[in-house]
């Protein structure tokens, strides 16, 4: 049987005419031939090309899988640039092919009935099926027409498409969601659709479990027979095929059971033979747990009296009264079942305070004591040494250890253990010898009636033992630890006697000691004779040499009176074994003489003398006034002086008084003091112009004043008044002249009015000039200038002349 010629020619046309219908019939024929098992055509050629056989098409068929609702692309092995590509589809179980789409490379045509396959489109020669439908299961044939040289060639691609359906979300069902423990429960996993084979899996998660666990079943049914409390929890099932895997929503299986017998725990946890124990003053928590569903209701009893409801009973601060029997009752209200458990609780408390450790010295050994009484139960004590472990005993333990061979710094530890304490309580004893050697010293009581011998050897464990011995090594009194004191009656015959303090310690060999000898004090002064100028400061120093017992230092003045801290001008400066005497502003009349430094103790006295000479300063040189002149308005004076010969001086002093002849001239007063000794001039202000003063100068040398200079009164400076007088006189003459001219002018015009004016003009002019001169020579009052030093009186300003200009304007 040959393929009709129309089969190929119709594919060359690009129209929807009858030729296209014939082409479709050709496709159907081709596809039918491919599915006809008895068709065995002989290869023939069409335009030089052999036709494909059914056997070749079957052998070349390619299987492709697609998922419903997804997209799948069917390739066409059409070679390079076909002229026409024709796609056809044959459903499973059918022999009739159906045209799907055709394209010539520039345009394409999709059969309207192809929508049953999905959304059909062409991509080059490939057929694309979007939103794949289950109806697309079947065979697809692609026929491509090519031109090679002058001949036409046809290629065929045969594909078998399998459409897979995803499994739907499983639905889980329980035959009894709340069974009682021991019953039977069946769980069913239902899947509505999905391509076979479908595989099932089961998951189980307990309410408090770490995660889901797989159940061995792979069937859609899960049978739990009998159900128990371990089956309680969430169940999910999952279904999977070659396309996907989905899980159902969780379904809770609530298994009803219990309550079991309660289990009681105590925190903090402590066990005794009878039950539990807890420490005093700590928080104690009693917890009760009875497996039950629904959860049990709990009640607590102490010695048959209810004290609490709930699974946990908290004692905030446990006391000794909380000791007793505690019962937990558990009740399942759903099943109305009850269980209970009883325990004994004992409150422990440690002994009060801390363990006490001590060590006592004995001959050739040390005795270690450790005690810590009280508590429930009693504490266990154990001594541990550097080389061995001592005995163990409750509350009180004593251990005698040989001192021979014990190194300095050996540590012994007493370990105290008590169940109420988290850690052992320790007390330690460190054996060590006191450092250095004993120290001896003496002191005297008030009034020096007794001498106290003191000996100290501090430190060490155990403390050292001390005792006093006399010169014949006989004991004085009893022994004591660390500090030994012995009193002696103060007597003069004690000077020179020796006493020994002997120490003893288990770790020290041989026994150390210290000695002291009683003696009278010895003094030393820096200088036995001291000179100082009057007004200066001087120090007298006295030092106490070593003596036993200590002495008291004091100074006696030249009048043999003890110098007290309140003595004027004398200051005591104690500094350890020294006593310094400070004399301020030395005065020959009061301070010169012999001073004594005296030392006293209970054994005797001693003294040292110091001779103090207070020298006067030499007299300063004499002073001569060289110049004493008034300044302006006689309110200040300029003073200059000179000294006669060299001499030591510290300042100058200017004195003044009113210079009135006679015996009542007045006392001298200080005008200015503390003038620099290098100065030789001074300007002194603040004078009264109406008083005539007398001045003198004295040179000072510390507290010594020289002879006063001669007494002088100030004089006016040369020519200092002339300019003012001449200026006033000139002014008066000018005024008089002007007045005279006016009068003469008026008289000349009116001779009948002033007949005698000519006789009066000259005397009146003279009187006017005299009055003007007197008025202009007076010095006007002004503010007194301050007194300021000046080395050159020539710098004083002189009175300047006054220039007066008078302008006269005559009016007709």
Image (cartoon, rainbow, N blue to C red):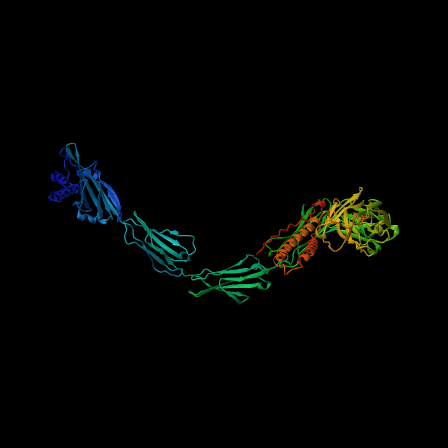
Image coordinates for residue 481, horizontal then vertical, percent: 76, 52
- Image quadrant holding the C terminus, namely bottom right
Say left or right for 151 vs 484.
left
Where residue 91 sits: x, y (%)? 19, 46
Q: Position of residue 527 (x, y in %)?
A: 83, 44
Q: Nearer the viewer, residue 465 or 763?
A: 763
Quadrant occupied by the N terminus:
top left
Residue 459 makes an appearance in the image:
no
The one of 720 and 319 positioned closer to us in this rendering: 720
Q: Nearer the viewer, residue 113 or 812?
A: 812
Q: Is residue 491 left or right of residue 172?
A: right
Nearer the observer, 13 or 469: 13
All told, the count of numbered labels is 0
Q: Quadrant of residue 691?
A: bottom right
Q: Residue furthest right?
A: 493
Q: Residue furthest top?
A: 149
Residue at 30%, 47% in the rendered image: 243
Determine if residue 209 is in view: yes
Residue 399 picture location, percent across and down:
70, 51
């Amino acid at each position: 049987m040959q393929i009709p010629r129309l089969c190929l020619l119709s594919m060359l046309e690009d129209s929807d005419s009858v030729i296209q219908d014939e082409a479709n019939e050709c496709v159907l024929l081709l596809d039918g031939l491919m599915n006809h098992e008895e068709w065995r055509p002989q290869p023939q050629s069409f335009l030089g090309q052999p036709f494909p056989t059914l056997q070749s098409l079957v052998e070349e068929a390619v299987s492709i899988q697609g998922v419903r609702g997804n997209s799948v692309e069917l390739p066409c092995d059409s070679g390079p640039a076909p002229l026409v590509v024709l796609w056809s589809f044959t459903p499973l179980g059918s022999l009739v092919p159906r045209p799907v789409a055709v394209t010539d490379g520039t345009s394409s045509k999709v059969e309207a009935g192809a929508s049953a396959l999905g959304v059909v489109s062409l991509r080059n020669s490939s057929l694309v099926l979007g939103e794949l439908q289950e109806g697309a299961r079947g065979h697809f044939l692609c026929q491509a027409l090519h031109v090679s040289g002058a001949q036409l060639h046809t290629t065929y691609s045969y594909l078998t498409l399998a459409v897979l359906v995803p499994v739907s979300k499983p639905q889980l069902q329980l035959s009894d969601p709340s069974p009682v423990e021991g019953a039977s429960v069946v769980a069913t996993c239902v899947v509505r659709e999905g391509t076979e084979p479908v595989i099932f899996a089961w998951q189980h998660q307990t309410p408090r479990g770490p995660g889901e666990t797989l159940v061995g079943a792979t069937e859609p049914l899960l049978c739990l027979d009998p159900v128990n409390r371990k089956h309680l929890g969430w169940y999910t099932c999952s279904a999977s095929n070659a396309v996907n895997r989905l899980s159902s929503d969780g379904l809770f299986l609530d298994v009803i059971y219990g309550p079991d017998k309660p289990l009681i725990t105590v925190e903090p946890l402590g066990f005794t033979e009878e039950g539990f124990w807890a420490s005093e003053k700590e928080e104690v928590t009693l917890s009760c747990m009875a497996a039950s569903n629904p959860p049990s209701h709990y009640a607590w009893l102490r010695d048959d009296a209810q004290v609490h409801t709930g699974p946990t009973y908290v004692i905030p601060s446990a006391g000794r009264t909380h000791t007793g029997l505690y019962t937990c009752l558990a009740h399942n209200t759903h099943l109305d079942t009850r269980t209970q458990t009883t325990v004994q609780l004992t409150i422990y408390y440690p002994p009060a305070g801390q363990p006490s450790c001590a060590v006592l010295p004995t001959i050739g050994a040390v005795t270690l004591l450790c005690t810590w009484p009280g508590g429930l139960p009693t504490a266990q004590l154990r001594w541990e040494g550097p080389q061995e472990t001592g005995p163990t005993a409750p509350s009180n333990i004593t251990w005698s250890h040989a001192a021979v061979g014990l190194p300095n710094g050996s540590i012994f530890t007493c370990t105290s253990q008590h169940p109420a304490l988290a850690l052992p309580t320790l007390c330690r004893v460190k054996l060590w010898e006191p450092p250095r050697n004993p120290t001896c010293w003496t002191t005297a009581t008030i009034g020096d009636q007794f001498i106290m011998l003191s000996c100290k050897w501090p430190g060490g464990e155990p403390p050292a033992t001390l005792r006093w011995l006399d010169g014949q090594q006989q004991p004085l009194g009893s022994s004591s630890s660390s500090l030994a004191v012995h009193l002696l009656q103060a007597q003069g015959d004690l000077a020179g006697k020796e006493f020994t303090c002997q120490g003893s310690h288990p770790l020290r060999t041989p026994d150390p000691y210290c000695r002291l000898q009683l003696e009278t004090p010895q003094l030393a002064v820096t200088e036995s004779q001291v000179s100082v100028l009057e007004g200066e400061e001087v120090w007298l120093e006295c030092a106490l040499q070593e003596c036993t017992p200590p002495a008291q230092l004091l100074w006696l003045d030249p009048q043999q009176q003890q110098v007290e801290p309140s003595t004027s001008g004398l200051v005591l400066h104690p500094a350890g074994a020294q006593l310094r005497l400070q004399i301020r502003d030395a005065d020959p009349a009061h301070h010169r003489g012999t001073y004594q430094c005296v030392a006293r103790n209970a054994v005797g006295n001693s003294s040292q003398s110091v001779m103090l000479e207070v020298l006067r300063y030499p007299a300063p040189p004499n002073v001569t006034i060289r110049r004493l002149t008034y300044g302006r308005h006689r309110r200040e004076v300029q003073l200059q002086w000179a000294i006669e010969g060299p001499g030591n001086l510290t300042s100058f002093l200017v004195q003044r008084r009113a210079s009135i002849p006679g015996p009542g001239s007045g006392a001298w007063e200080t005008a200015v003091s503390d003038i620099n000794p290098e100065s030789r001039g001074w300007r002194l202000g603040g004078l009264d112009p109406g008083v005539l003063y007398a001045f003198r100068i004295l040179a000072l040398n510390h507290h010594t004043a020289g002879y006063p200079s001669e007494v002088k009164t100030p004089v006016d400076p040369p020519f200092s008044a002339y300019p003012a007088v001449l200026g006033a006189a000139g002014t008066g003459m000018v005024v008089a002249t002007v007045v005279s001219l006016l009068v003469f002018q008026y008289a000349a015009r009116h001779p009948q009015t002033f007949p005698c004016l000519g006789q009066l003009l000259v005397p009146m002019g003279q009187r006017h000039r005299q009055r003007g001169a007197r008025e202009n020579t007076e010095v006007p009052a002004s503010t007194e200038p301050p007194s300021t030093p000046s080395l050159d009186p020539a710098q004083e300003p002189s009175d300047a002349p006054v220039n007066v200009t008078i302008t006269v304007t005559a009016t007709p």
